[in-house]
Image: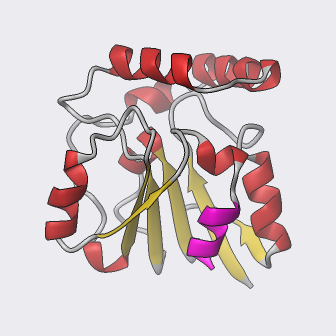
Amino acid sequence: MKTFAIQYGFAEGPKIAQKFITDLTHDGWELTSVETADIIIAHSGGSRVIPEINSAESIVLVNISPWPEVSLLGALTRKLTSERFSASKVLWNFWYGISNIPYAFSMKRNYSLPPANKTIIIRNIKDTYMPKKRLTELSAAGYEIIELPGTHDDIWENPTSYINIID
């Protein structure tokens, strides 16, 4: 059986990713730890806390953030004014945000990306955190870049396109 792990962004966790997890497990994948997974899926700030030592054959980074030239407050404001949110999602974001403060501090501003030969970078066209200009730099460095429609948290709400890439 193929295994996967998720590195969540700030104020995220399994309840927010439930549709993605359910759909991927129905597709024959098993959720496991980041240290032993065949593939690591990292969203947003979660891309900054991938252990350097892991057994992943592939790593998928979705909407990497934060970037030094992007104001986090500005990006968050644009996100909140451009996306639809359910009351349930807002409550879970709040819960994960206050309960994961040490995790948030572990999301380093400066870090190294995983090796290009095993990493796919996905950016949603309407993402407010990852500047589009970064795609050119990352592509020139050998990373496979995929742009998809949607907003920053689209992976959790509309997982089919992401699962098709992972499969």
Name the image quarter holding residue 44.
Answer: top left
Residue depicted at 42% across the width and 55% down the height = 50
Q: Nearer the viewer, residue 53 or 81?
A: 81
**Where residue 61 sits in the image (x, y, percent)?**
43, 57
Q: Quadrant of the N terminus?
A: bottom right
| Residue range of the region highlighted in magenta in the rendering | 160-167
Front position in the image: 105 or 138: 138
Q: Taking the image as drawn, is residue 35 in sight?
A: no
Which quarter of the picture shows residue 127? top left
Give how far across and how far down residue 6 sits, in percent: 59, 55
Q: Is residue 82 magenta?
A: no
Quadrant of the frame with the C terminus: bottom right
Queried whether the magenta region covers residue 165, the answer comes back as yes
The residue under the point 37% across, 46% down is 64
Relative to 138, 161 lies left or right: right
Compared with 5, 81 (above or below) is above
How many labels sit on residues?
A: 0
